[in-house]
Image: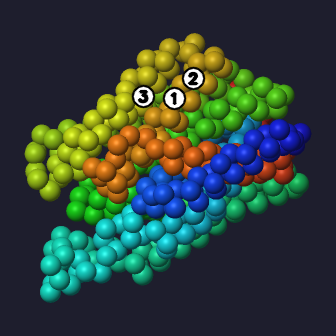
Amino acid sequence: MNYTFPQKNKNLTFILMAIGVITIIAGFLMNPHRTWSALLINNFYFLAIGLCGTFFVAVNYIAQAGWAVGFKRVPEAMGSYIMFGMLGMILIFLFGHHDLYHWTHAELYDKKNPEYDEIIAGKHGFLNIPFYVVRLIAYFCIWVGFTYWFRQESLKEDIDGGVNHYHKCIKIGAIFIILFGVTSSTSAWDFLMSVDAHWFSTLFGWYTFAGLFVSGLATMCLLILYLKSKGYLENVNENHLHDVGKFMFAFSIFWTYLWFSQFMLIWYANLPEEVTYFKARWDHYRLLFWVNFFINFIFPFLVLMTRDAKRKRQVLVIAGTAILMGHWIDVYLMVMPGTVGLDWNGFNIIEFGVLAGYAGLFLFVVQTSLSKAPTVAKNHPLLPESLAHHI
C-alpha cells in the first residue's frame, strides 16, 4: 500500500517553507551574518538526518539484517533529502563563505598584510576555495548517487523479485560504507570544524557522525510511529520499535563518550591552541553547553534505559523529540561561537524561522518520496524475517 500524502500535511509544509523564506529575506535585510549562520546550522542538520537514512540502509544490507526490512522505505525516503541538502550547502558556501569561514579571506595568506595568519596559511593546502568546491561536488556525487542507486534497486526488486537486486545492494552498500567512512569525517571538517580554522580535533569526525546517526534514528522512529498511527506499516510492532529505541539509547551514550573525550582531554591538557574552542563556548554559551549535555545524554539515558520504555509509543515520541532538539543545539554550538562569537545575545527569531523552513522542506520531500512507492518492500528476500522478528 502506498502512502497518501494528506493535503493538510502539504499545507503545513508549505506554511513552514513560506515562514522560512520570509525569515531568510528579512534576515538578510536585518542581520546577514546571523542569517548565514542560521542557514549553515539548519542546512547541515537536516542534511545529516537525510544522510543517516542512506547510511542505515547500507549498514543493514552489509549486515544482511532482516529485522528492519518492514520499514526500510522510511530511511530510503529520508535519504531523498540529501540532494536538496547538498545543493543548499553548495549555495551557502558559494555566496556566504566570507561570513562563515574566516579562512576564505585572501589577506590571511599575504605575508605583507598585517592580517596575515601563519596558522591558517599553514592549512592552505587543504583549506582553499577551489579544493573545497571540488570536495563539495564529490560529496554531492557520492551521497546523492548512492542514495539514488539504492532506491532504484529497491524499486526494481518490487517488480522483479528474486535475490539479484538484494545481492547487488550488498555490494553497493560495501562500497558506500568505505566512501562514507572517509567523506563523513572530511565533510565534518569542511562544513563545521573549519568555522574555527585555528582549532582541530582528531575526534571531530566521529563526534559529528554520532550526532548525525542518533538524530537520524530519532527522525526514523518518529516517522515510523506517525505512519503506524495512520494505518501503514501494520507489520511493524513493538519488537521493531524496541530495536530502534535500543539504537537511540546506545548512540546517545556513544555521542556522550565522544563529547566527554574531546572536552576532557583538551581541558586537562590546557593547551592554548586547543582550549580556545571550548573557552569560547564556556565563557559566553555556558548555559547551552550544559543543556546540550543534559538533553543529549542524561535525558535519553534515563528515559530509554528500561525495556518497557523502548516499546511504548509515548516514551519514544518524547525521547525522539528531545534528541532532535538536543542535537540541533549541538550543531548550533558548533557554528555560532565561531561565526557570531561574542555578539551572540541568545536565540534569535532568525534561527527558528529558518528551522521552520527547513523542517517544512524536509517533511515535504520525505512524504513525497514515501508516496511514490509501497511502504513495504514486498519482494525483499528477508521480509519474512522482519515479519517474524521477536525479542
370 up-or-down from 315: above or below: below
On screen, residue 312 versus residue 331, left or right, reads right
Pointer 1: what residue?
322
293 vs 10, left or right, is left
Rendered residue at 78%/25% (across/down): 229
Residue 87 visible in this rendered orientation of the protein: yes
Q: Is residue 243 left or right of residue 334?
A: right
Nearer to the camera, 63 or 52: 52
Q: Amino acid at mark 3?
A: Ile
Q: Amino acid at mark 2?
A: Ile
Residue at numbered disc 2? 318
For the N terminus, the quadrant is: top right
> Does residue 136 show up?
no
Labels 3 & 2 near each other (Cβ < 8 A) = no
Marks 3 and 2, how far apart in space?
A: 12 Å
Image quadrant where residue 291 sits: top left
Q: Residues within 10 Å of mark 2 (few under 14, many from 20)?
A: few
Q: Which residue is mark 3?
A: 295
